[in-house]
Protein backbone atom coordinates (compact mmCIF):
# COMPACT_ATOMS: atom_id res chain seq x y z
CA UNK A 1 0.00 0.00 0.00
CA UNK A 2 1.27 3.44 -0.91
CA UNK A 3 2.42 5.44 2.11
CA UNK A 4 0.12 8.32 2.89
CA UNK A 5 1.42 11.87 2.63
CA UNK A 6 1.73 13.36 6.11
CA UNK A 7 0.33 16.88 6.26
CA UNK A 8 0.21 19.70 8.79
CA UNK A 9 -2.47 22.25 7.90
CA UNK A 10 -2.06 25.90 8.87
CA UNK A 11 -5.37 27.74 8.53
CA UNK A 12 -7.32 30.90 9.29
CA UNK A 13 -10.57 28.88 9.11
CA UNK A 14 -12.33 30.71 6.28
CA UNK A 15 -14.98 29.11 4.06
CA UNK A 16 -12.41 27.81 1.57
CA UNK A 17 -10.22 26.55 4.42
CA UNK A 18 -13.11 24.27 5.39
CA UNK A 19 -13.17 23.01 1.82
CA UNK A 20 -9.44 22.29 1.94
CA UNK A 21 -9.51 20.66 5.37
CA UNK A 22 -12.45 18.40 4.57
CA UNK A 23 -10.82 17.31 1.31
CA UNK A 24 -7.59 16.32 3.06
CA UNK A 25 -9.30 14.65 6.00
CA UNK A 26 -11.42 12.65 3.55
CA UNK A 27 -8.51 11.75 1.25
CA UNK A 28 -7.17 8.22 1.90
CA UNK A 29 -3.80 9.22 0.44
CA UNK A 30 -3.29 11.85 3.16
CA UNK A 31 -2.56 11.58 6.87
CA UNK A 32 -3.38 14.89 8.56
CA UNK A 33 -1.28 14.93 11.72
CA UNK A 34 -2.12 18.39 13.12
CA UNK A 35 -4.03 21.55 12.28
CA UNK A 36 -2.57 24.87 13.38
CA UNK A 37 -4.82 27.90 13.58
CA UNK A 38 -3.99 31.56 13.12
CA UNK A 39 -6.21 34.36 14.38
CA UNK A 40 -4.74 36.83 11.89
CA UNK A 41 -7.06 36.11 8.98
CA UNK A 42 -10.74 35.28 8.75
CA UNK A 43 -11.66 33.79 12.13
CA UNK A 44 -10.51 35.16 15.46
CA UNK A 45 -8.13 32.81 17.21
CA UNK A 46 -10.31 31.31 19.95
CA UNK A 47 -13.27 30.91 17.60
CA UNK A 48 -11.07 29.36 14.93
CA UNK A 49 -9.55 26.87 17.37
CA UNK A 50 -12.98 25.80 18.63
CA UNK A 51 -14.35 25.54 15.11
CA UNK A 52 -11.51 23.30 13.96
CA UNK A 53 -11.87 21.11 17.04
CA UNK A 54 -15.59 20.70 16.34
CA UNK A 55 -15.00 20.14 12.62
CA UNK A 56 -13.20 16.94 13.61
CA UNK A 57 -16.53 15.45 14.73
CA UNK A 58 -17.29 14.97 11.03
CA UNK A 59 -14.60 12.31 10.80
CA UNK A 60 -15.36 9.82 13.55
CA UNK A 61 -14.05 9.15 17.02
CA UNK A 62 -10.46 8.53 15.92
CA UNK A 63 -10.17 12.09 14.61
CA UNK A 64 -11.32 13.78 17.81
CA UNK A 65 -7.86 13.83 19.40
CA UNK A 66 -6.05 15.23 16.36
CA UNK A 67 -3.80 18.02 17.69
CA UNK A 68 -5.31 21.48 17.17
CA UNK A 69 -2.63 24.13 17.57
CA UNK A 70 -3.41 27.56 18.97
CA UNK A 71 -1.27 29.99 17.01
CA UNK A 72 -0.82 33.74 16.63
CA UNK A 73 -3.37 36.40 17.48
CA UNK A 74 -1.63 39.18 15.56
CA UNK A 75 0.55 39.38 12.45
CA UNK A 76 4.30 39.88 12.61
CA UNK A 77 4.03 43.20 10.77
CA UNK A 78 1.25 45.76 10.31
CA UNK A 79 -2.34 45.20 11.37
CA UNK A 80 -4.13 44.30 8.15
CA UNK A 81 -7.40 42.54 8.92
CA UNK A 82 -10.56 41.34 7.23
CA UNK A 83 -13.65 43.53 7.74
CA UNK A 84 -15.66 42.83 10.88
CA UNK A 85 -18.63 41.32 9.04
CA UNK A 86 -16.36 38.86 7.22
CA UNK A 87 -14.78 37.82 10.52
CA UNK A 88 -18.21 37.40 12.13
CA UNK A 89 -19.23 34.94 9.43
CA UNK A 90 -16.02 32.95 9.89
CA UNK A 91 -16.32 33.01 13.70
CA UNK A 92 -19.86 31.61 13.38
CA UNK A 93 -18.65 28.90 10.95
CA UNK A 94 -21.06 30.35 8.40
CA UNK A 95 -24.05 28.97 10.34
CA UNK A 96 -23.15 25.47 9.15
CA UNK A 97 -23.87 23.01 11.99
CA UNK A 98 -21.19 20.66 13.25
CA UNK A 99 -22.42 17.15 14.10
CA UNK A 100 -21.41 17.62 17.72
CA UNK A 101 -19.14 19.45 20.11
CA UNK A 102 -15.76 17.74 20.35
CA UNK A 103 -15.74 16.10 23.81
CA UNK A 104 -11.97 15.67 23.98
CA UNK A 105 -10.19 18.37 21.95
CA UNK A 106 -6.41 18.21 22.11
CA UNK A 107 -5.46 21.89 22.00
CA UNK A 108 -1.79 22.88 22.22
CA UNK A 109 0.30 26.01 21.91
CA UNK A 110 1.34 26.08 18.26
CA UNK A 111 4.94 27.16 18.70
CA UNK A 112 5.63 24.66 21.48
CA UNK A 113 4.00 21.76 19.66
CA UNK A 114 5.59 22.50 16.29
CA UNK A 115 9.04 22.95 17.78
CA UNK A 116 8.85 19.72 19.78
CA UNK A 117 7.36 17.82 16.88
CA UNK A 118 10.04 18.75 14.37
CA UNK A 119 12.86 18.23 16.86
CA UNK A 120 11.65 14.64 17.31
CA UNK A 121 10.32 13.95 13.83
CA UNK A 122 12.05 11.54 11.44
CA UNK A 123 9.52 11.55 8.59
CA UNK A 124 8.88 13.89 5.69
CA UNK A 125 6.04 16.35 6.26
CA UNK A 126 4.11 18.50 3.82
CA UNK A 127 2.79 21.79 5.19
CA UNK A 128 -0.39 23.22 3.70
CA UNK A 129 -0.28 26.95 4.40
CA UNK A 130 -3.73 28.46 3.81
CA UNK A 131 -3.91 31.16 6.46
CA UNK A 132 -1.00 33.50 5.91
CA UNK A 133 2.56 33.09 7.10
CA UNK A 134 2.35 34.11 10.75
CA UNK A 135 2.57 30.76 12.55
CA UNK A 136 5.38 29.31 10.46
CA UNK A 137 7.00 32.73 10.20
CA UNK A 138 7.37 32.72 13.99
CA UNK A 139 8.62 29.12 13.94
CA UNK A 140 11.23 29.78 11.26
CA UNK A 141 12.31 33.03 12.94
CA UNK A 142 12.83 31.19 16.24
CA UNK A 143 15.07 28.70 14.42
CA UNK A 144 17.47 31.35 13.13
CA UNK A 145 19.62 31.06 16.27
CA UNK A 146 19.00 27.33 16.76
CA UNK A 147 21.05 25.26 14.35
CA UNK A 148 19.52 21.97 15.46
CA UNK A 149 15.95 23.17 14.92
CA UNK A 150 16.89 24.73 11.59
CA UNK A 151 18.32 21.48 10.30
CA UNK A 152 15.38 19.45 11.59
CA UNK A 153 12.92 21.79 9.89
CA UNK A 154 14.81 21.73 6.60
CA UNK A 155 15.14 17.96 6.64
CA UNK A 156 11.66 17.28 7.98
CA UNK A 157 9.56 19.58 5.77
CA UNK A 158 9.50 18.09 2.31
CA UNK A 159 7.65 21.09 0.93
CA UNK A 160 5.24 23.85 1.78
CA UNK A 161 2.17 24.13 -0.42
CA UNK A 162 1.02 27.69 0.13
CA UNK A 163 -2.06 29.41 -1.22
CA UNK A 164 -1.07 33.03 -1.64
CA UNK A 165 0.19 35.80 -3.81
CA UNK A 166 -0.06 36.65 -7.46
CA UNK A 167 2.30 37.38 -10.31
CA UNK A 168 1.29 40.75 -11.71
CA UNK A 169 0.67 41.56 -15.39
CA UNK A 170 3.93 43.53 -15.46
CA UNK A 171 5.78 40.22 -14.93
CA UNK A 172 3.72 37.59 -16.74
CA UNK A 173 0.99 37.23 -19.34
CA UNK A 174 -1.71 36.66 -18.31
CA UNK A 175 -1.01 38.28 -14.99
CA UNK A 176 -3.28 38.50 -11.97
CA UNK A 177 -4.10 41.56 -9.93
CA UNK A 178 -4.72 41.35 -6.20
CA UNK A 179 -7.99 40.21 -4.66
CA UNK A 180 -8.37 42.51 -1.67
CA UNK A 181 -10.82 44.97 -3.20
CA UNK A 182 -12.75 42.22 -4.98
CA UNK A 183 -13.22 40.34 -1.72
CA UNK A 184 -14.37 43.39 0.24
CA UNK A 185 -17.41 44.38 -1.80
CA UNK A 186 -18.90 47.42 -0.08
CA UNK A 187 -16.15 47.37 2.54
CA UNK A 188 -13.40 48.77 0.31
CA UNK A 189 -11.02 50.79 2.44
CA UNK A 190 -7.61 49.55 1.35
CA UNK A 191 -5.70 51.39 -1.35
CA UNK A 192 -3.95 48.21 -2.42
CA UNK A 193 -4.84 46.65 -5.75
CA UNK A 194 -1.82 44.39 -6.13
CA UNK A 195 -1.76 42.04 -3.11
CA UNK A 196 -3.50 38.77 -2.31
CA UNK A 197 -5.20 38.33 1.07
CA UNK A 198 -3.11 35.57 2.67
CA UNK A 199 0.16 37.42 2.11
CA UNK A 200 -1.39 40.85 2.71
CA UNK A 201 -2.43 39.78 6.22
CA UNK A 202 1.22 39.28 7.19
CA UNK A 203 3.84 40.16 4.58
CA UNK A 204 6.70 39.63 7.03
CA UNK A 205 5.53 36.12 7.88
CA UNK A 206 5.42 35.29 4.17
CA UNK A 207 8.87 36.81 3.64
CA UNK A 208 10.39 34.68 6.39
CA UNK A 209 8.75 31.56 4.96
CA UNK A 210 10.01 32.32 1.45
CA UNK A 211 13.57 32.88 2.61
CA UNK A 212 13.96 30.06 5.14
CA UNK A 213 15.15 27.50 2.62
CA UNK A 214 12.29 24.98 2.48
CA UNK A 215 10.84 24.21 -0.99
CA UNK A 216 7.60 26.10 -1.64
CA UNK A 217 4.90 25.55 -4.23
CA UNK A 218 2.85 28.74 -4.31
CA UNK A 219 -0.73 28.38 -5.52
CA UNK A 220 -1.17 31.92 -6.78
CA UNK A 221 -4.22 33.83 -7.96
CA UNK A 222 -2.97 33.26 -11.50
CA UNK A 223 -4.01 29.62 -11.06
CA UNK A 224 -7.00 29.97 -8.73
CA UNK A 225 -8.60 32.48 -11.11
CA UNK A 226 -8.89 29.58 -13.55
CA UNK A 227 -11.12 27.69 -11.09
CA UNK A 228 -14.08 29.86 -10.08
CA UNK A 229 -16.65 28.26 -7.81
CA UNK A 230 -19.57 27.87 -10.18
CA UNK A 231 -23.13 26.77 -9.52
CA UNK A 232 -22.54 23.51 -11.39
CA UNK A 233 -19.90 22.54 -8.84
CA UNK A 234 -22.14 23.52 -5.93
CA UNK A 235 -24.99 21.43 -7.37
CA UNK A 236 -22.76 18.36 -7.61
CA UNK A 237 -21.50 18.91 -4.07
CA UNK A 238 -25.08 19.27 -2.80
CA UNK A 239 -25.95 15.92 -4.38
CA UNK A 240 -23.35 14.05 -2.30
CA UNK A 241 -25.29 12.73 0.68
CA UNK A 242 -22.54 12.56 3.29
CA UNK A 243 -22.13 14.65 6.45
CA UNK A 244 -18.87 16.10 5.09
CA UNK A 245 -20.33 17.23 1.76
CA UNK A 246 -23.50 18.53 3.39
CA UNK A 247 -21.48 20.56 5.88
CA UNK A 248 -19.61 22.23 3.01
CA UNK A 249 -22.86 22.81 1.16
CA UNK A 250 -24.16 24.64 4.23
CA UNK A 251 -20.98 26.74 4.39
CA UNK A 252 -21.39 27.75 0.75
CA UNK A 253 -25.09 28.50 1.30
CA UNK A 254 -24.23 31.23 3.83
CA UNK A 255 -25.58 34.42 2.18
CA UNK A 256 -22.25 36.20 1.78
CA UNK A 257 -20.70 33.07 0.27
CA UNK A 258 -23.70 32.24 -1.90
CA UNK A 259 -23.53 35.74 -3.37
CA UNK A 260 -20.01 35.01 -4.60
CA UNK A 261 -20.81 31.77 -6.41
CA UNK A 262 -20.33 32.35 -10.10
CA UNK A 263 -18.95 35.83 -9.44
CA UNK A 264 -15.91 36.40 -7.20
CA UNK A 265 -15.40 33.16 -5.24
CA UNK A 266 -12.58 30.91 -6.44
CA UNK A 267 -11.13 27.54 -5.48
CA UNK A 268 -8.41 29.26 -3.48
CA UNK A 269 -7.43 26.98 -0.60
CA UNK A 270 -8.99 23.74 -1.88
CA UNK A 271 -6.94 24.01 -5.07
CA UNK A 272 -3.79 24.15 -2.95
CA UNK A 273 -5.00 21.10 -1.00
CA UNK A 274 -5.79 19.14 -4.14
CA UNK A 275 -2.29 19.68 -5.56
CA UNK A 276 -0.70 17.84 -2.62
CA UNK A 277 -1.68 14.50 -4.15
CA UNK A 278 -2.59 15.69 -7.65
CA UNK A 279 0.10 18.21 -8.66
CA UNK A 280 -0.77 17.93 -12.35
CA UNK A 281 -3.93 19.95 -11.72
CA UNK A 282 -1.76 23.06 -12.12
CA UNK A 283 1.09 24.20 -14.29
CA UNK A 284 3.99 25.88 -12.54
CA UNK A 285 6.84 28.20 -13.37
CA UNK A 286 9.77 29.17 -11.17
CA UNK A 287 10.18 32.85 -10.28
CA UNK A 288 12.74 34.66 -8.13
CA UNK A 289 10.45 36.46 -5.71
CA UNK A 290 10.56 39.10 -3.01
CA UNK A 291 7.61 39.92 -0.75
CA UNK A 292 7.37 43.73 -0.75
CA UNK A 293 7.31 45.02 2.82
CA UNK A 294 7.04 48.81 2.62
CA UNK A 295 3.64 50.29 3.41
CA UNK A 296 2.56 53.45 1.59
CA UNK A 297 -0.96 54.45 2.53
CA UNK A 298 -1.33 56.61 -0.60
CA UNK A 299 -0.12 53.96 -3.03
CA UNK A 300 0.15 50.72 -1.11
CA UNK A 301 2.17 48.00 -2.81
CA UNK A 302 2.85 46.07 0.40
CA UNK A 303 2.61 42.27 0.24
CA UNK A 304 2.93 42.27 -3.54
CA UNK A 305 5.31 39.74 -5.06
CA UNK A 306 8.25 41.31 -6.86
CA UNK A 307 10.13 39.33 -9.49
CA UNK A 308 13.81 40.02 -8.74
CA UNK A 309 16.35 37.78 -10.45
CA UNK A 310 19.17 39.10 -8.26
CA UNK A 311 17.73 39.19 -4.73
CA UNK A 312 14.63 37.03 -4.97
CA UNK A 313 14.09 33.47 -3.70
CA UNK A 314 13.29 30.74 -6.20
CA UNK A 315 9.63 29.77 -5.73
CA UNK A 316 7.59 27.35 -7.86
CA UNK A 317 4.41 29.26 -8.69
CA UNK A 318 1.20 27.75 -10.03
CA UNK A 319 0.25 30.03 -12.90
CA UNK A 320 -2.63 28.05 -14.44
CA UNK A 321 -5.09 25.35 -13.41
CA UNK A 322 -7.50 22.97 -15.13
CA UNK A 323 -10.98 23.69 -13.81
CA UNK A 324 -12.79 20.54 -14.94
CA UNK A 325 -10.02 18.30 -13.61
CA UNK A 326 -9.99 20.19 -10.29
CA UNK A 327 -13.75 19.83 -9.91
CA UNK A 328 -13.54 16.12 -10.76
CA UNK A 329 -10.72 15.43 -8.29
CA UNK A 330 -12.34 17.32 -5.45
CA UNK A 331 -15.74 15.68 -5.92
CA UNK A 332 -14.14 12.25 -6.36
CA UNK A 333 -12.60 12.46 -2.91
CA UNK A 334 -15.75 13.84 -1.30
CA UNK A 335 -17.67 10.81 -2.65
CA UNK A 336 -15.26 8.33 -1.04
CA UNK A 337 -16.18 6.52 2.16
CA UNK A 338 -14.72 7.98 5.31
CA UNK A 339 -11.20 6.63 5.92
CA UNK A 340 -10.82 4.37 8.93
CA UNK A 341 -8.36 6.70 10.64
CA UNK A 342 -6.78 10.03 9.85
CA UNK A 343 -3.77 10.37 12.10
CA UNK A 344 -1.00 8.14 13.27
CA UNK A 345 0.74 11.00 15.11
CA UNK A 346 0.57 11.09 18.89
CA UNK A 347 -0.21 14.40 20.51
CA UNK A 348 2.84 16.30 21.70
CA UNK A 349 2.77 19.01 24.32
Image (spheres, grey):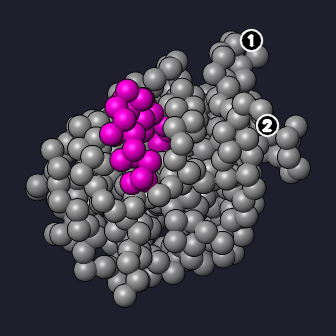
Residue 182 location, quadrant: top right
The x, y position of residue 30, in whole percent, is 39, 71
Task: Please tell me whether residue 106 is drawn above or below residue 87 in the rendered image.
Answer: below
Q: Residues within 10 Å of mark 1 (few under 14, many from 20)?
A: few
Tell me, yes or no, if residue 268 can be seen here: no
User: Is 156 part of what is drawn in magenta?
Assistant: yes
Q: Quadrant of the C terminus?
A: top left
In this view of the protein, which residue sits in the foreground, 175 or 213? 213
Q: Is residue 14 magenta?
A: no
**Quarter of the figure with the N terminus:** bottom left
Query: Would residue 224 appear left or right of 177 to someone viewing this image?
Result: left
User: Tag count in the figure?
Assistant: 2
User: Are there few (<14), some (14-19), or many (20+) residues within 10 Å of tag 2?
Assistant: few
Along the line of sight, the residue nearer the viewer: 39 or 170: 170
Q: Tell me the number on the disc at residue 201.
A: none
Work out whether mark 2 precedes mark 1 in sequence or the reverse, and give the earlier one: 1
Q: Which mark is residue 298?
A: 1
Above or below, comparing residue 285 to residue 79 in the picture: below
Q: Position of residue 255 (x, y in %)?
A: 51, 49
Q: The residue tagged with tag 2: helix, strand or loop?
A: loop
Q: Is residue 33 left or right of residue 126?
A: left
Amino acid sequence: MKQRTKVIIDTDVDFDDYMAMVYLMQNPEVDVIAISVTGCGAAHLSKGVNNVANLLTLFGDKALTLPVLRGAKAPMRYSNVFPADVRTGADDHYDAPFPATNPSPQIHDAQTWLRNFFLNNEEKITVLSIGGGTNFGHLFLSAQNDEVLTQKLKSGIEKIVMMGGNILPRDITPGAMGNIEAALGDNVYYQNTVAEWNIFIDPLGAKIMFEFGVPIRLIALNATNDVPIEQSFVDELNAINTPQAQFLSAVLAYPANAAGIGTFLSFWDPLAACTITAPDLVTTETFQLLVWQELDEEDDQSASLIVDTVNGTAIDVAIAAFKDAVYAEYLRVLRLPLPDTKSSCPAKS
